[in-house]
């Protein structure tokens, strides 16, 4: 049952939905419809056309003409961070909800996040949700991390990005401004850095439901290791400057994990020399987890080739899924390498949870000290 307060929409907190859009004609209309279908009644939608060369601006202008909640801003192409920051400068809401121009929301997303943000005695810096991965046709092809972490979580978030995308957050406006908005120096990972900056100062809350459809677009920046690697290098440097100083051990853990992901991405693109170089970086940074992960990937590949697991059937559309429905079981979960990898990650996350608890206690002592 909803706990949304009764009364006119204007009496409720305003949520500013910000949509950066660059050459997004294929998906923008569907994305805006999902934003405007939200059950939370007091929203504004700010679309920033970031110098598109296709029909993006025309699509947004049509929505602006048909719905008074939509505002279209235009600028020369400067990247997603500058587009989001322009939208934030024009936003009037108590909360800001970023939405990428190719992602989708379940109709109850904002309502459930606002309720979660207002429920506790200490307001969180941001509230996030779980997400499903969708293809260009909007069919579910996987799910993101399933951790339901709340409170001060910055050490665990440094190790594993459990938010996973930029469309899953509802951010308290003052926490967003305190963090300085999105870093325009980054080509990729700007949402992750923002999450870390907020999480280093504020508690985090979650709505543990699959309320976001995160679209995997061929050719996007998020699918290219060549843009990801320099951005990750910059993020790693900025993390040291702006977040609680990670111990050397945790620093190499997170670097090894990212380098392994980049190596896998390069291999998929048949850039084998680059994949090998990145794998060596991962092995140098974190030989234990990299070896476990490599053993799991090779075992899974052999099983696929041997016909030991049936190929996944096309998933349902995102709109047809229930937000509380659990993802399909992993057909490779029985592999010994997978079990060992999970146990290793669980031990590390438990260790980082203790660091977060110590950090929370320290922050609590600072808050009450004279």
Image: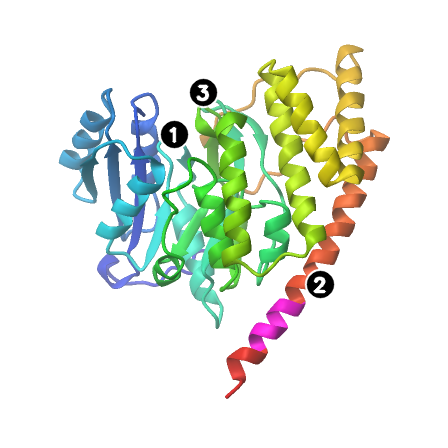
User: Where is residue 23 drawn, in percent x and y?
Assistant: 30, 24
The residue positioned farthest toward the bottom in the image shown: 370
Residue 68 is tagged as none
The residue positioned farthest toward the right in the image shown: 336
Q: In this orientation, which residue lies closer to the viewer: 361 or 274?
A: 274
Color style of the picture: rainbow
Look at the picture and state if 146 lies above or below 370: above
Please give the residue where the numbered disc 3 appears in the rendered image.
219
Which residue occupies 60% across, 16% down? 271
Q: Quadrant of residue 329?
A: top right
Q: Is residue 188 visible?
A: yes
Mark 1 or mark 2, which is nearer to you?
A: 2
Q: Is residue 89 left or right of residue 290?
A: left
User: Where is residue 185 drawn, in percent x and y?
Assistant: 39, 42
Which residue occupies 20% across, 45% down? 69
Q: Is residue 358 left or right of residue 3?
A: right
Look at the picture and state if 260 lies above or below 82: above
User: Where is residue 316 drawn, in percent x and y?
Assistant: 53, 24
Mark 3 or mark 1, which is nearer to you?
A: 3
- Crowd class of label 1 (few under 14; some 14 to 19; many from 20; radius 10 Å): many
- Crowd class of label 3 (few under 14; some 14 to 19; many from 20; radius 10 Å): few
Please give the residue where the numbered disc 1 appears in the rendered image.
102
Q: Is residue 335 magenta?
A: no
Q: Marks 1 and 3: in contact by CB < 8 Å?
A: no
Which badge, 2 or 3, comes first in the chain's sequence? 3
Please give the residue where the numbered disc 2 appears in the rendered image.
354
Q: Is residue 313 visible?
A: no
| Prevalent SS, magenta region | helix
From which residue to which does the magenta span run?
A: 358-364
Q: Is residue 368 left or right of residue 352?
A: left
């Amino acid at each position: 049952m909803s706990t949304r307060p009764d009364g006119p929409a204007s009496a409720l907190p305003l949520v500013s939905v910000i949509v950066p859009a660059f050459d997004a004609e294929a998906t923008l209309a569907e994305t805006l419809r999902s934003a405007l279908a939200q059950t939370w009644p007091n929203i504004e939608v700010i679309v920033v056309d970031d110098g598109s060369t296709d029909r993006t601006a025309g699509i947004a202008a049509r929505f602006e003409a048909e719905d008074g909640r939509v505002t279209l801003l235009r600028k020369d192409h400067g990247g997603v961070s500058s587009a989001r920051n322009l939208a934030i400068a024009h936003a009037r809401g108590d909360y800001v909800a970023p939405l990428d121009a190719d992602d989708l929301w379940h109709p109850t997303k904002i309502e459930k996040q606002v309720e979660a943000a207002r429920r506790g005695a200490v307001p969180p810096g941001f509230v996030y949700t779980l997400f499903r991965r969708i293809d260009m046709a909007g069919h579910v092809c996987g799910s993101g991390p399933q951790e339901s972490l709340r409170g001060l979580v910055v050490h665990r978030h440094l190790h594993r990005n459990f938010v996973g995308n930029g469309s899953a957050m509802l951010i308290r406006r003052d926490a967003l401004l305190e963090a300085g908005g999105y870093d325009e120096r980054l080509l990729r990972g700007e949402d992750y850095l923002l999450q870390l900056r907020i999480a280093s100062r504020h508690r985090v809350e979650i709505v543990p439901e699959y309320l976001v459809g995160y679209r995997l677009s061929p050719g996007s920046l998020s699918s290219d290791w060549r843009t990801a690697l320099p951005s990750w290098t910059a993020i790693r440097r900025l993390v040291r400057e702006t977040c609680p100083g990670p111990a050397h051990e945790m620093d190499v853990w997170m670097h090894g994990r990212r380098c392994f992901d980049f190596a896998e991405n390069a291999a998929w693109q048949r850039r084998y020399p680059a994949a090998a170089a990145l794998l060596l970086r991962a092995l140098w940074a974190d030989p234990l987890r990299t070896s476990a992960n490599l053993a799991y990937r090779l075992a899974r590949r052999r099983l696929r080739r041997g016909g030991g697991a049936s190929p996944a059937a096309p998933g349902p559309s995102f709109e047809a899924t229930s937000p509380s429905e659990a993802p399909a079981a992993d057909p490779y979960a029985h592999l010994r390498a997978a079990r060992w990898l999970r146990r290793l990650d669980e031990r590390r996350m438990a260790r980082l949870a203790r660091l977060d608890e110590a950090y929370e206690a320290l922050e609590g002592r600072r808050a009450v000290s004279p």
